[in-house]
Every structure is written in C-alpha cells, then in structure tokens.
Image (cartoon, grey):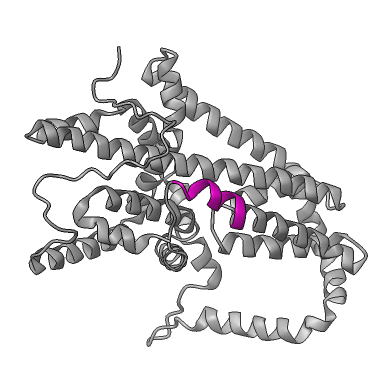
Amino acid sequence: MADPLRIEIPTTETVPLEPPQLAGEDGPLPADPKLVIQACLLVLAVLTVCYFASDIILPIVLAIVLKLLFQPAMRLLEKLRVPRTLAALLVILTVFGAIVAVGAALSGPATAWGEKLPGGVDRLEERLKFLSQPIGALQKFLHQFDGVATGVGGAPGPTLAETLMKGTQHFASGFFETILILFFLLVSGDTFLRRMVEIVPSFSDKRRVVDLSQQIEENVSAYLVTITLMNAAVGVATGLAMWACGLGDPILWGTVAFLLNYVPIMGPFAGVGIFLFAGLLTIDPLVQALLPAGLYLLIHLVEGEAITPMLLARRFTLNPVLVIISLIFWFWMWGVPGAVLAVPMLAMMKIICDGVRPLNAVGHFLEG
C-alpha cells in the first residue's frame, strides 16, 4: 500500500520546485526585532549545549546524517516489500560489515608501513636536509603551541595532539549509541513527519509540511550519496595511481584518499602531505618520489574543481568562505568528527532555509 504522505516528484523535470511557504509569512525576514534577538539567543543556547554535551549530541547528529545517507537504500528495500525492521538491520549490517572487512584488509599493509617508519627516519632526514631549519622552526612553534594554553596557576593546557583527538574519543565511546539511534531512526520512517502533519491545523499547511520534508530529505540524501560516490571514485583512482607509480598497497592508499575527501580543503592538504611523506620514504629518485603527491593532487583538483561542482550545482552550492568557517568552528567544537559533519550540516541548514520563507535570506547568504 502506498504511503499516503509520500508525494512522488517526477525526477525527469529540470525546473526546480518553488520552495514551500507556510501560512502567515509576509516577508523574507521577521519584522519584530525581539523575535530576531530570541532566535539568536536560541542558536547560542543550542551551540552551548552541543559543546558541553558533545558525548550525547555528537552520536545523535551522526545518526541523523547516516539516516539521510541510507534513506535511498531503505526506499529501495521498501519497494521490494522488505519489512522496515529487517531492512534497517540489513543496511546497518551491510555497511558496518563492509567497514570491518576493509579494516581487516588494511591491518596488514598498515602494520607493514608502521614497521618501515623507524628505519626510514634517517633516510627521510637525509633527503630533506635542506629543510632542517624550517622543520626546526616548526618544531619550536608546535612546542610553544602546546604550552600556550597554560593557566595563571601553572596548569598546562591541552596539547596539539589532544586538540586533534578532541571529539574523536567521544565518538568512539558513543559508537554503540550511534548504531542504536540509527537503527530506530531507520525503523521509524515517516513517524515524526506524520506527527508534525497531525499537529498542523489546515490541509494546505499539512501539504506544505510534507513538501518541505520531502525536499529536505531528497536534497540532503542526494548530496550525501553524491559526495560518497565521488569520494569512492577518488579512492579507486588514487589507489590505482599509487600502484602505478610504485608506492604499492592500493587498497590502503585508496581508503586513505576516500576518508580524507570527506573533509573539504583540510583533508586534501593532509593527503598531499601523507603521500609526499610516503613517496620520500620508499621511492629512490627524488623526482619520482614526488609523483604520488602530485598524482593525488591532480585527482583531487579534477574531482573537487570540475566533476563534483558540476553534479551538485543543479541542487545547490555553498559559500566557500562559510565552508572554511564551518570546518574551523566544528573542528574546534567536536574535533575530527565535527570537521567531517561540518559541510553536511551546513548543506542541511541551507536546504531548510531555502524551504522556509522567513529564513530565505539566510539561505541566500549561505549560497555560493
């Protein structure tokens, strides 16, 4: 039986849907300044809760994003008459089973590279002798950075490594919570949408709530699926390129490129450094040792500057300055998981703002 709340939107139409607007909205922004101030205070309160309750909030946000990512697979299983509970179990077990399998496959190459590091340090220092002074300056800076947060009473502040790992430990400890919430979100389906429709009084507003919910789900799901497929393509291309230039272990390097591509700008920069280090550590001719980093950078430029923008431009684009600010802010807030979630959360915010007329100005501000 078809879902009575599901309104099918033809995928062949190229004309974008006009954003649904709720009744009683007369302008692009609220006219009452008190309402604006209250909204700002609400945002500050939410961000404060996100910071101090990160152990709880981070797994919930990650589960919501994963639910939107897996929603197309759930729709497909529903069309095949698979019960929602069984479909949710199949999706979760398939995805995380694949993650465990890839992790097991990577354990051997990662261990081998870890064994190469102690013996390769002398070789690396010899090849980078001309960088000894800049590296010494960088080490001095990092040492000062680790002690810059020292309090008045002499209490040491967090080190750089602790800053980088902030949020990652929270996510690891809340992994079971993430899986549990994700399972029930997938099983619940449109339950929250049904409750929202029951609360809205008029039929026209019920229809608009359904349209807005579908627009948010479809656009965010399409964005996440597109990004994941492109990251997988980058991983495959990088693995083949590393194998072709003599670095070896294509599965390891492809997985590294796949994961780093989820963090815009900062991830590819880290990738260039990793492949440069690996090339200098294992490949003899200096020019050829630079080839892995150069190939990775070329693959990223083709994907990030041409293919992905072309695929996503039909739906929306984001202001690159705000993307950088979002990455820095959520990295400070939740560490590495925050940097991974920064762009999806920014995209979700823009889609919601584009669909609600009082927030259209904010959506226009977020647009690239």
The residue shown at (41%, 34%) is 13
In this rendering, would 184 be left or right of 256? left
Q: In this view, does 179 lie above or below 339?
A: above
Is 349 covered by the magenta stretch? Answer: no
The range drawn in magenta is 305-314
Residue 185 makes an appearance in the image: yes
Q: Is residue 225 above or below residue 332?
A: above
Image location of residue 238, percent across then percent down? 73, 49
Q: Is the magenta stretch mostly helix, strand or loop?
A: helix
The residue shown at (36%, 49%) is 348
**Image quadrant containing the C terminus:** bottom left
Which of 336 and 324 lies nearest the eye of the viewer? 324
Which of 273 and 100 lies nearest the eye of the viewer? 273
In this rendering, would 239 be left or right of 365? right
Q: In this view, does 220 lie above or below 8?
A: below
Classify residue 157 by image quadrant: bottom left
Image location of residue 208, percent across then percent down? 20, 37
**Image quadrant containing the N terminus:** top left
Residue 176 makes an appearance in the image: no
Image location of residue 344, percent across then percent down? 43, 51
Image location of residue 68, percent across then percent down? 40, 38
The residue shown at (60%, 49%) is 307
The residue shown at (42%, 80%) is 155
Classify residue 190 by image quadrant: top left
Which of 78 and 185 lies nearest the eye of the viewer? 78
* Count of picture labels: 0
In this rendering, would 145 be left or right of 140? left
Classify residue 299 by image quadrant: bottom right
Q: Going by the picture, which residue comes out furthest to the right?
A: 285
